[in-house]
Image: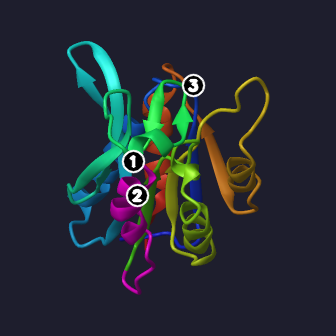
Amino acid sequence: MAVAPGKCFLVTGPPGVGKTTLIMRVFETLKTSNPSLKIQGFYTREIREGIERVGFEVVTLDGRKAPLASTIISSPESIRWPTVGKYKVDIASFEAVALPELQIKEDTDLFIIDEVGKMELFSSSFFPAVLKVLESNIPLLASIPIPKFGRDIPAVARLRNHPGAKIFTLSPSNRDAVREQIYTQLVDSE
């Protein structure tokens, strides 16, 4: 069993619909069915204090993590950080953990990038690294935000319009079916 080369699967949908959960379930299923697969990448997850979301962190597939954005970090540097809504984005922290995960290695079977969104795109090095992955012919499973008010982020539009991209729009009713579809299409039965 191998992962089909050159595939680009983009999962999109409204916030909270389960894009990260779906991507992590596909990752876990792939690792269970084929432990020798070399999968690189990262996902983002919420940081909560009680019921309140206070930020996001970036987590590599092997468990290293770093802050991505926060409402509670306050430091001399954070004054200059870009903001998305109420969150200050820690670009240096994000880049230190995420960018090494996007380095193309000969034995990489799959890249997972969750997500290619507004916060991540504040890094000027991030999107060029994503494009290199796309051009590498190594399969990519990524999540992208849904256009807001009909406007897409230019970098996200480039991914969405990429000739090899397959887009899956997630909803609460189709999550399991989409997960099956992605898994089946990702795995190339020899």
Q: CA distance from mark 3 to mark 2?
A: 27 Å
Is residue 138 at least partly visible in the picture? Answer: yes
* Amino acid at circle 1: Glu
Residue at the image position 59 percent from the left and 71 percent from the top: 6
In the rendered image, residue 171 lying in the magenta stretch gets the answer no
Q: Is residue 19 visible?
A: no
Q: Is 112 placed left or right of 75 in the picture?
A: right
Residue 104 locus on image (x, y percent): 45, 79
- As helix, strand or loop, the secondary structure at mark 2 comes to helix
Contact? badges 3 and 2 (CB < 8 Å):
no
Of labels 3 and 1, earlier in sequence is 3
Q: Looking at the picture, tell me which residue is in the foreground, 109 or 180.
A: 109
The earlier-in-sequence mark between 2 and 1 is 1
Q: Which residue is mark 1?
A: 77
**What are the residue bounds of the magenta stretch?**
90-107
Distance from Cα at disc 2 to Cα at disc 1:
10 Å
10 Å crowding of disc 3: few (<14), some (14-19), many (20+): some
Residue closer to the observer: 89 or 35: 89
Element on which disc 1 rests:
helix
Location of the N terminus by quadrant is bottom left
Q: Quadrant of residue 44?
A: top left
Q: Residues within 10 Å of mark 2 (few under 14, many from 20)?
A: some
Give the residue drawn at x 40%, y 83%: 105
Query: In front: mark 2 or mark 1?
Result: 1
